[in-house]
């Protein structure tokens, strides 16, 4: 039986049935999944039994697998291999983190709207988030359709931002919630330029490309850039563009970071365990190269 696509809305988010991702995906099913990914941008695969190898292997269908930045952070020993980003609230022993654990504050940064790895020169393509345990209340993940947000944007504002470049940094998003990166961590993840408008290479649709990691815009005063970024993020995350996913144990949800914003919703993270692990595929290159943009000479990042 072929993979079955059940749209959640006409053009954004869909559930995929009749596919077991613990087994190799054949070409016919992959064609259905890939087409759904390029159409709906968020795919929900319920009731999957995914060992790490199969989880990472499926992410590799979308591109080279990124490695977790926690490997180069000032944190305790990791719970998961570097091919998985540990976005849980669990320590290396599998227990809920205590309030003095530095990573609990770092993970709370995921409650801000963002796209994965936009703070890296080559950002993420597909994120494949697998949920092994969930809190009984709270902890949803919300997804915003940045394609629909672009389509609904005032034409004058479209013209204003197309061809512009924003500067992204993991330190920018974490500072919004009071988390301080160390000097060594900042050196490992310097600020990077990203196009503010992207053209999806499969669908041809344009989308706003921003995140809580974006803190400034090249050749724009900081006060003006901050106001514009805030305006665009508020526009793109209006309820009509958002799908909220209520997790079930063993859900795998995949989203296209090229055209989707997402954020985790709060839960009692000092009480309830939430075992969330993400395999992430890299995009094909820096966004400014994909969009044919050039940085002004002597641009300071």
Image (cartoon, helix red, strand yellow):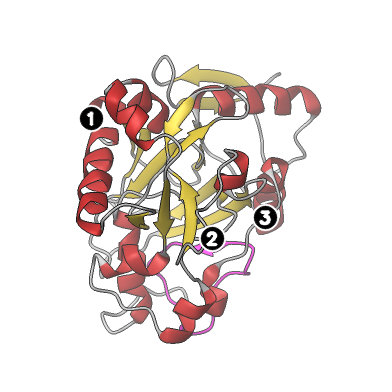
Q: Is residue 289 magenta?
A: no
Residue at image location 31% in from the left, 45% down from the top: 140
* Mark pair 2, 3: CA separation: 14 Å
| Badge count | 3
- Does 288 appear above or below 73? above
- Does 45 appear above or below 114? above
- What is the span of residues highlighted in magenta in the rendered image? 73-92
- Circle 1: element type: helix
Residue at image location 56% in from the left, 48% down from the top: 294
Mark 2, residues whose alpha carbon is within 10 Å: few (<14), some, or many (≥20)? some
Nearest the eye: 194 or 264: 194
Residue 283 percent across, percent down from the top left: 62, 46
Assign the C terminus to one quadrant of the image.
bottom left
Q: Which residue is mark 2?
A: 120
Q: Does label 2 or label 1 sit earlier along the sequence?
A: 2
Task: Classify residue 65 as left or right of residue 272.
Answer: right
Residue at image location 58% in from the left, 22% down from the top: 203
Q: Does label 2 or label 3 sit earlier along the sequence?
A: 3
- Taking the image as drawn, is residue 118 in sight? no
- Circle 3: element type: loop
Residue at image location 50% in from the left, 54% down from the top: 296
Mark toward the viewer: 2 or 1: 2
Q: Which mark is residue 239?
A: 1
Mark toward the viewer: 2 or 3: 2
Nearest the eye: 93 or 245: 245
Cβ–Cβ below 8 Å for labels 2 and 1? Answer: no
* Mark pair 2, 1: CA separation: 29 Å
Q: Give the main secondary structure of the magenta stretch.
A: loop
**Residue 18 placement: quadrant:** top right
- Taking the image as drawn, is residue 239 in sight? yes
Q: Which residue is mark 3?
A: 65
């Amino acid at each position: 039986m072929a993979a079955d696509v059940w749209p959640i809305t006409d053009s954004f988010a869909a559930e995929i049935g009749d596919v077991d991702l613990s087994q190799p995906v054949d070409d016919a099913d992959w064609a259905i999944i890939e087409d759904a990914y390029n159409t709906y941008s968020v795919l929900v695969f319920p009731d999957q039994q995914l060992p790490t190898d199969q989880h990472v292997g499926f992410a590799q269908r979308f591109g080279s697998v990124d490695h977790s930045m926690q490997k180069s952070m000032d944190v305790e020993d990791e719970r998961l291999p570097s091919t998985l980003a540990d976005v849980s609230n669990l320590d290396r022993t599998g227990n809920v983190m205590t309030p003095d654990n530095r990573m609990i504050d770092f993970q709370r940064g995921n409650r801000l709207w963002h796209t994965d790895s936009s703070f890296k020169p080559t950002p993420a393509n597909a994120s494949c988030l697998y949920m092994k345990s969930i809190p009984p209340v709270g902890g949803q993940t919300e997804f915003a359709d940045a394609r629909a947000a672009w389509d609904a944007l005032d034409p004058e504002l479209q013209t204003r931002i197309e061809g512009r470049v924003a500067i992204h940094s993991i330190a920018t998003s974490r500072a919004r919630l009071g988390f301080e990166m160390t000097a060594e961590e900042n050196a490992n993840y310097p600020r990077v330029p990203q196009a503010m408008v992207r053209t999806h290479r499969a669908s041809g649709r344009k989308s706003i490309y921003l995140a809580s990691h974006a803190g400034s815009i090249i050749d724009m005063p900081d006060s003006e850039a901050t106001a514009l970024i805030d305006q665009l993020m508020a526009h793109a995350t209006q309820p009509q563009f958002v799908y909220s996913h209520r997790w079930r144990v063993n859900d795998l949800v995949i989203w296209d970071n090229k055209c989707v914003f997402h954020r985790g919703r709060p839960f009692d993270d000092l009480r309830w365990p939430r075992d969330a692990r993400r395999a992430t595929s890299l995009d094909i290159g820096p966004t400014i190269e994909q969009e044919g943009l050039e940085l002004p000479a002597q641009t300071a990042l």
